Image (tube, rainbow, N blue to C red):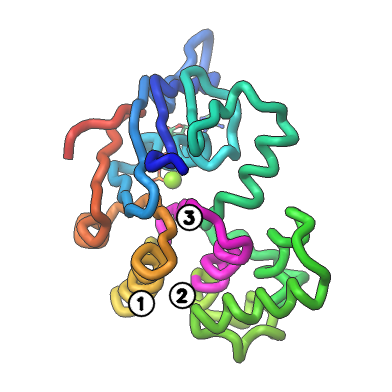
Amino acid sequence: MNDMLISARHLTAHVASTGKHTLRIVNDVSLDIQRGESYAIVGKSGSGKTSLISILGLLNARYSGDLMFDGKNMRSIPDRERAVVRSTRIGFVFQNYSLIPQLNVWQNVALPMQYARKGSSSRRKHRALDCLRQVGLDARAADRPRTLSGGEQQRVAIARAMVCAPDLLICDEPTGALDKDTGDAVMELLMRLVRTEGRTLVMVTHDTDIAKLCQHQLRMDRGMITPC
Ligand SMILES: Nc1ncnc2c1ncn2[C@@H]1O[C@H](COP(=O)(O)OP(=O)(O)OP(=O)(O)O)[C@@H](O)[C@H]1O
Ligand SMILES: [Mg+2]
């Protein structure tokens, strides 16, 4: 087993902007993420945080540079194999929860297992309920997401990210839309996953107090990682 879960070298990503210019939204980023540790990425709005974690989480393959996940270069494996790594080893919590309104809470949580073709349908339901219990929401399993508060929806999104027992949990502003108490409860849950289950956490936050709860802090500025 590799101690370094992620090694990124010279990651660079461009998007087309007005005229002939291209904008470097991720600019020569090199970093190491150690297994079982927690990392906070802080930085101003528009500094490239979401863009960077989309690359680290294998959601965006349009970059230059090298990305090693558990010792394997993600560029040199076939798309299909990369999709398996993404769906079985990485859990992603999006900036806006992205729960599916037509599905109830447990069906939302079970969805990554379905995508990864893991388990029978009864096994998936059982596991989804188990994850919902861990985030304190098993009583709401049959409800639709829209009937839940923002903090509850965020906890459902975390349960969904955990359902395949991923090595790496990537969370984009998991406390951004929450009041302090609810945000603290979400952070406690995330830190517990790192401490007791050995998960690796990479989270984006604009809140420096929350960032300090993580073992490591990285700052992004205009697409670059700068010292904190
Ligand atoms: N697909 C795209 N096309 C054009 N510009 C983009 C695209 N994706 C991101 N950008 C631009 O790249 C920059 C970085 O965006 P990104 O979403 O990564 O920032 P962020 O640090 O996550 O910001 P926030 O804190 O507001 O979520 C922004 O200026 C954004 O407008
Ligand atoms: Mg963002």
Mark 2–mark 1 Cα distance, whole angstroms, equals 9 Å
Name the spot of residue 80 as percent of width and height, x first: 75, 35
Q: Quadrant of residue 99?
A: bottom right
Q: Are marks 2 and 1 in contact (CB under 8 Å)?
A: yes
Name the spot of residue 7 as percent of width and height, x first: 41, 32
Whichever of callouts 2 and 1 sits on the residue coming sooner in the sequence is: 2
Residue that mark 1 sits on:
185
What kind of residue is marked 3? Leu
Q: Quadrant of residue 46?
A: top left
- Magenta highlight range: 155-174
- Please say whether residue 178 is one of the residues in the magenta stretch: no
Asked whether, in this view, residue 75 is left or right of residue 168, the answer is right
Residue that mark 3 sits on:
169
* Image mark for residue 151: 2
Q: Secondary structure at mark 1?
A: helix
Above or below, 163 relative to 127: above
Point out the frontmost of discs 2 and 1. 1
Mark 3–mark 1 Cα distance, whole angstroms, equals 17 Å
- Please say whether residue 164 is one of the residues in the magenta stretch: yes
Q: Secondary structure at mark 2?
A: helix
Whichever of callouts 2 and 3 sits on the residue coming sooner in the sequence is: 2
Considering depth in this image, is 117 or 63 the residue closer to the camera? Answer: 117
Q: Residues within 10 Å of mark 3 (few under 14, many from 20)?
A: many
Tell which residue pokes out farthest to the front in this image. 1
Q: Residue at x 47, y 36 (%)?
A: 51
Considering depth in this image, is 3 or 205 the residue closer to the camera? Answer: 3
Above or below, 180 relative to 140: above
Q: Residue at x 74, y 72 (%)?
A: 124
Whichever of callouts 3 and 1 sits on the residue coming sooner in the sequence is: 3
Q: Residue at x 52, y 8 (%)?
A: 20
Q: Quadrant of residue 141?
A: bottom right
